[in-house]
Image (spheres, helix red, strand yellow):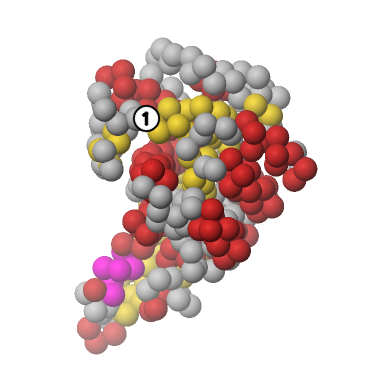
Amino acid sequence: MIERVKVAVVGVGNNVSALVQGIALQRATGNLVGVRRTVLHGLGVGDVDFTAAFALSREKVGRDLSEAIFMPPNNFPRLIDELPLSGVTVRRGLTDATEVERVAGELAGAEVVLYAAPSGRRETAQAYAEAALRAGAAFVNITSDAVARDPQIMRRFTEAGLPLLGDDLTSQFGTSIVHHALLHLLQERGLTLTSSYQVNLGGTEDFRNLVENGNTKMQSKLNALTAHESAADKVEIAPLGYLPHLESHKVAHINIEAQTWGGTPVSLDLKLKVHDPSGGAGVTVDLIRMAANALRHRHAGYVAEATPLLKSPPGTSI
């Protein structure tokens, strides 16, 4: 029987809430709705154990992880009525770089460190990567902060024989993946793109943070959309909008203007509404299993199979 993956999470927000609850739901009921890969490298969805968790919120630090995920400002809904205690007490996260050694010690035993704190704090993200490096753990960065794209950090993980996956996950069915697919379809069918834009509105704490610290996220979204040469100068991303009443929903609007045979116009407007954390968790569970498999088979550095699940893998703009 394959050994479960031991995962430490950094950040106890909505994305982690969706992940923790979804794994518990699968274990309790066998529910595989929305699961892309029931088994990946021999690991099932339920083969993920949480061994440590870090947060800065006073409402979360000191609580069991299964309780902390429901503390405000988290607003992702309950997926399971009775969520058993995890046995993992949320610890105080890094407050400055001098605490890296403390956190590294508290990561002992974890195979994979999942960085899911709010985006826009590059120094913090890199400090946790350093802690994972010292603890001998793989690192998965699902935020838009540059970690895997930093050549020096990637080199150090590679030399240490540790996997490093990132940056910024592409949601299961979110704005970037839908927009990207539509742009690819235009190119494939021979249409000429005139212009395109997307608008994203959400009510999670991460959205609120990104409204204030959105530069890295904007670049990451552009990385995901401008892989097609025809789109490089014709796609615009509007500033993110935070609307608390949307709670964990994200509402996106996509517009595409193009020309077909003879220069005649084509116009497409699309609205997408999703639970943003669910789309993240559906991808994160695969990234965790990829990282664990790479660690166990001593495949160091970047894991190429993760590329379709990421907006900004190594080599894209910072």
Q: Identify the magenta region.
A: 182-187
Q: Is residue 49 left or right of residue 14?
A: left
Q: Position of residue 174 (x, y in %)?
A: 39, 50
Foreground residue among 292 and 317: 292
Please, is residue 51 above or below residue 147 in the view? Answer: above
Q: Is residue 46 left or right of residue 93?
A: left
Please, is residue 95 above or below residue 263 in the view? Answer: above
Q: Secondary structure at mark 1?
A: loop
Look at the image and tell me in which quarter the C terminus lies. bottom right
Foreground residue among 235 and 88: 88
Looking at the magenta stretch, what is its main secondary structure?
Answer: helix
Mark 1 highlights which residue?
A: 4
**Residue at the spot x=44%, y=14% of the render?**
84
Is residue 206 at all visible to an observer of this figure? no
**Residue at the spot x=58%, y=47% of the render?**
133
Look at the image and tell me in which quarter the N terminus lies. top left
Q: Is residue 274 magenta?
A: no
Residue 6: name its quadrant. top left
Please, is residue 150 above or below residue 91 in the view? Answer: below
Mark 1 neighbour density, 10 Å: few (under 14) some (14–19) many (20 or more): some
Please, is residue 271 above or below residue 113 in the view? Answer: below
Q: Amino acid at mark 1?
A: Arg
**Residue at the spot x=41%, y=12% of the render?**
82
Is residue 6 at all visible to an observer of this figure? yes
Q: Position of residue 54 (x, y in %)?
A: 62, 32
**Residue at the spot x=25%, y=23% of the render?**
30
Residue 61: name its quadrant. top right
| Count of numbered badges drawn on the protein | 1
Foreground residue among 20 and 224: 20
Foreground residue among 222 and 191: 222
Find the residue positioned furthest to the bottom: 262
